[in-house]
């Protein structure tokens, strides 16, 4: 038991950060950036690209595809950590987006992220740390437009 | 940022050298910023298949380096009027590209105080890979 | 755009039209430029092999997530709304190979005014391995409400 505790990569310093909201990140949603994003995905849906077309839809104008909240794109998993992790290799474990309101060009998206959980396991890659986080995206009116949840894997 | 004035400039005077230590990452960033996604700048097997010795630096990125060389030198009160460069030689990511310049002429035209600068990038062998010229307007004196 | 799908058209177990992507290194570099994720193992083969111990350049997980998202968005159409998408990065997709996005309706139910469908979604590599399994929830338009 004592030995297990010694080997844990989850330090008391890390645990202190659970639930602590990080500094806000501000993204501006530009039409050109949405276009670059769609070209990169290969998604040519005119809802994201063609104002005339988008005007006739229920959205009344261009919207950003789910997952785009301005550049740089946050995956909800990566971010600056205020603590040291002894396992230096990083992978993105997974992403979840809950879409609440459409994101439109001209919006300013303010996102805040917090760590929600740490888990460790001995897996295929050796000792592995799973860091769960949640990112809330709000627009310039303070409305929550989306919630992102992510898992970062350190090994 | 320091300001240089027209009366301090002499023909033959050299600009402070700007060294750029380039990386493949930087070329990918340039591709993203400029929209020039030609594979010869990041896909090594592709570049070699086209007969190049490896990945090469975008010519327009080197032109931007030379733009920075001149704008850093002329300071916030200077105005870059014109720059043109020729792509004569290849540079490769990982190389340090030395950006150099030299004043060739100072003159006035109307109320403008103008300086013509010869600019170029230099590789490790001392070859001028991107020669060009720039014209800047400078403030008279403090 | 394909024609609009309605809640009444959907049955549990029904498969979504596949979306097949074949990302080339250029697309990974476009993604890096569009997102600001310049991690080198997505375009620098030497870096991927030597520094990251990978078999080669790999496709960004978030890009594969977008491929899956596009498959769902294409299916729900302009009148449908994608509410939630969740994927796990379980395996790697490599450039110059097919990345096949698939989905299947798991459940349909009316909740208040919303006609909801729950989907199982995933991407496959050419070996048939599910590299990015996940779930999605969407609201579909109803013919009854029209």
Image (cartoon, helix red, strand yellow):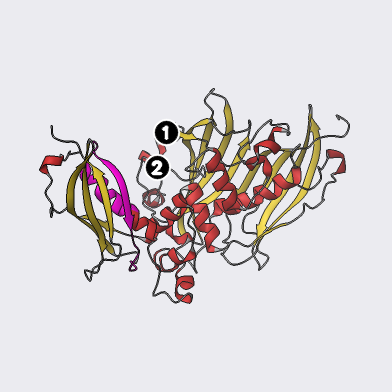
**Residue B12 falls left or right of residue A149:** left
**Can you tell which quarter of the image residue C45 is in?**
bottom left
- Residue drawn at x 45%, y 75% is B48
Q: Dot 1, crowdedness within 10 Å: few (<14), some or many (≥20)?
A: some
Which range is magenta?
B64-91
Query: At which x and y percent is residue A42?
Result: 62, 53
Q: In this rendered view, identify the residue nearer to me: C132 or A142.
A: A142
**Can you tell which quarter of the image residue C138 is in?**
top right
User: Label 1 near label 2: C-beta < 8 Å?
Assistant: yes
First in sequence: mark 2 or mark 1? Answer: 1
Query: At which x and y percent is residue C38?
Result: 44, 53
Q: Is residue C48 visible?
A: no
Tag 1, which secondary structure?
Answer: loop
Q: Which mark is residue A80?
A: 2
**Residue B120 falls left or right of residue C16:** left
Per the image, the residue denoted by label 1 is A22
- Residue drawn at x 66%, y 51% is C68
Query: At which x and y percent is residue B140?
Result: 16, 36
**Is C14 inside the magenta-drawn segment?**
no
Are the residues under marks 2 and 1 on the same chain?
Answer: yes
**Residue A73 falls left or right of residue B8:** right
Q: Does C88 appear above or below A148? A: below
Q: Dot 2, crowdedness within 10 Å: few (<14), some or many (≥20)?
A: few
């Amino acid at each position: 038991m004592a030995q297990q505790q010694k080997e844990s990569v989850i330090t008391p310093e890390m645990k202190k950060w659970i639930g602590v909201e990080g500094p806000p990140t501000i993204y501006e949603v530009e039409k050109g950036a949405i276009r670059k994003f769609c070209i990169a995905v290969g998604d040519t849906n005119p809802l994201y690209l063609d104002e005339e077309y988008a005007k006739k839809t229920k959205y009344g104008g261009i919207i950003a595809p789910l997952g785009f909240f301005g550049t740089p794109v946050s995956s909800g998993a990566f971010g600056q950590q205020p603590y040291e992790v002894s396992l230096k290799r990083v992978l993105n474990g997974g992403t979840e987006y809950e879409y609440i309101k459409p994101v439109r060009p001209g919006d300013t998206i303010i996102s805040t992220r917090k760590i929600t959980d740490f888990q460790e396991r001995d897996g295929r890659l050796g000792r592995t740390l799973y860091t769960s986080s949640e990112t809330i995206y709000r627009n310039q009116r303070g409305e929550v437009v989306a919630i992102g949840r992510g898992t970062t894997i350190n090994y | 940022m320091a300001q240089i004035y027209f009366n301090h400039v002499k023909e033959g005077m050299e600009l402070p050298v700007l060294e750029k230590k380039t990386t493949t990452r930087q070329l990918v960033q340039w591709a993203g910023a400029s929209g020039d996604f030609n594979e010869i700048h990041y896909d090594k097997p592709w570049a070699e298949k086209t007969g190049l010795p490896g990945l090469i630096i975008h010519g327009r990125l080197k032109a931007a380096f030379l733009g920075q060389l001149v704008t850093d030198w002329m300071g916030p009160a200077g105005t870059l009027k014109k720059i043109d460069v020729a792509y004569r030689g290849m540079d490769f990511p990982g190389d340090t590209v030395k950006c150099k310049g030299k004043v060739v002429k100072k003159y006035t035209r109307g109320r403008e105080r103008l300086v013509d600068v010869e600019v170029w990038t230099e590789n490790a062998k001392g070859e001028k890979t991107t020669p060009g010229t720039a014209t800047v307007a400078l403030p008279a004196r403090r | 755009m394909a024609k609009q799908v309605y809640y009444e058209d959907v049955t549990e177990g029904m498969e979504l039209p596949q979306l097949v992507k074949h990302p080339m290194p250029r697309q990974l570099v476009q993604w890096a430029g569009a997102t600001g994720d310049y991690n080198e193992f997505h375009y620098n083969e030497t870096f991927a092999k030597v520094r990251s111990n990978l078999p080669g350049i790999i496709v960004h997980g978030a890009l594969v997530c977008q491929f899956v998202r596009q498959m769902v968005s294409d299916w729900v159409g302009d009148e449908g709304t994608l509410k939630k998408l969740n994927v796990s990065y379980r395996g790697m997709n490599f450039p110059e190979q097919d990345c096949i996005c698939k989905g299947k309706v798991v459940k349909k139910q009316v909740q208040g005014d919303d006609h909801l469908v729950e989907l199982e979604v995933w991407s496959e590599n050419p070996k048939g391995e599910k590299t990015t399994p996940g779930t999605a929830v969407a609201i579909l338009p109803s013919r009854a409400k029209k």
